[in-house]
Image (cartoon, rainbow, N blue to C red):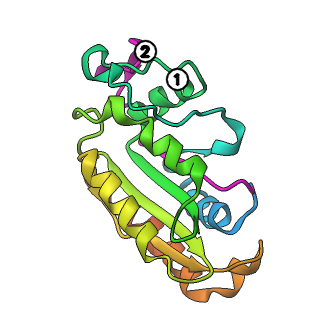
Amino acid sequence: MTEKQDPKGNKVCEESSTPVVLGIAGSARKKGNSATLLTQVLDELRGKFQTELIHLSDFNIHPCDGCHYCQTKHSCRIDDDMARLYPKLLQANVVLLASPAYMGGIASRMQAFMERTWPIRKGQMTNKVGSYILTGRRRIGMATGVMEEYFTRLGMLKLPGILGFAFESGTIAEDHEATAQVGKLAASVRKHLEMGE
């Protein structure tokens, strides 16, 4: 087991004996369509792996203000709930991000969260696995590009994500292709983690 420091200078165990899959839901609705798909993926992985579901709606996270404090201090000067998430990200082997697509982009909570991971972009997330779950009514493509670029910038290994088409809460169940992709993403995560054992 190795240790790293989070952006607040706390020691964090990077690896545990049981791989950790961290799911982060950016929707305002805990039972919204993207959160539902994320929960289903985590349910398929629970047992063999340690899983955790985080709803960003439970956290007070301010957007990055571009102060560049983290450039030299290697930590974030903003005092909010993001400090609770840095250790979880550093401990995780796999990070799954789920968000509805709004106006062609991702939900504002998810955007703020992603911006605030700037202090851990210097190799702390390298070779961890990342994937995404996006839901929307139509034209989700731009949001997909945002997620792909995010994982690239953190140096993470990327697995194909899930695109679900739904508008009202609960209607994701009617998207049978998205439901099938749940099993595929869970299988890809399982295969990757088992190969690393």
Q: What percent of the width, then of the height, locates residue 94?
A: 40, 48
- The residue depicted at 57 percent of the width and 56 percent of the height is 42
Query: In screen coordinates, is 166 left or right of 101?
Result: right
Crowd band around label 1 with a 10 angstrom C-alpha radius: few (<14), some (14–19), many (20+) = some
**Residue 50, percent across and down?**
52, 42
Q: Check if residue 2 falls in the magenta segment.
A: yes
Quick one: label 1 or label 2, which is nearer the N terminus?
A: 2
| Label 1 with label 2: CB-CB less than 8 Å | yes
- Which residue is drawn at the image coordinates 45% and 17% (left, top)? 77
The residue under label 1 is 83
**Label ID, residue 149:** none
| Amino acid marked by disc 2 | Lys
Q: Give the residue at mark 2.
A: 8
Would you identify the image quadrant in which residue 160 lies?
Answer: bottom left
Task: Kindly report the distance in space between the C-alpha atoms of the residues bearing marks 1 and 2.
Answer: 7 Å
Neighbours of disc 2 within 10 Å: few (<14), some (14-19), many (20+): some
Q: Is residue 146 above or below residue 10?
A: below
The stretch in magenta equals: 1-29
Is residue 196 in view? no
- Residue in view at x 42 percent, y 71 percent: 142
Camera-side residue of 180 and 130: 130
Residue 162, compared with residue 152, is above or below; it is below
Q: Is residue 109 magenta?
A: no
Amino acid carrying mark 1 in the image: Ala
Residue 2: percent from left, percent from top: 28, 22
Q: Residue at x 70, y 87 (%)?
A: 174
SS for dot 1 = helix
- The quarter of the picture where residue 173 lies is bottom right
The kind of secondary structure element at disc 2 is loop
Question: In terms of depth relative to the viewer, which is nearer, 192 or 69?
Answer: 69
Image coordinates of residue 193 in percent, x first then y, are 34, 52
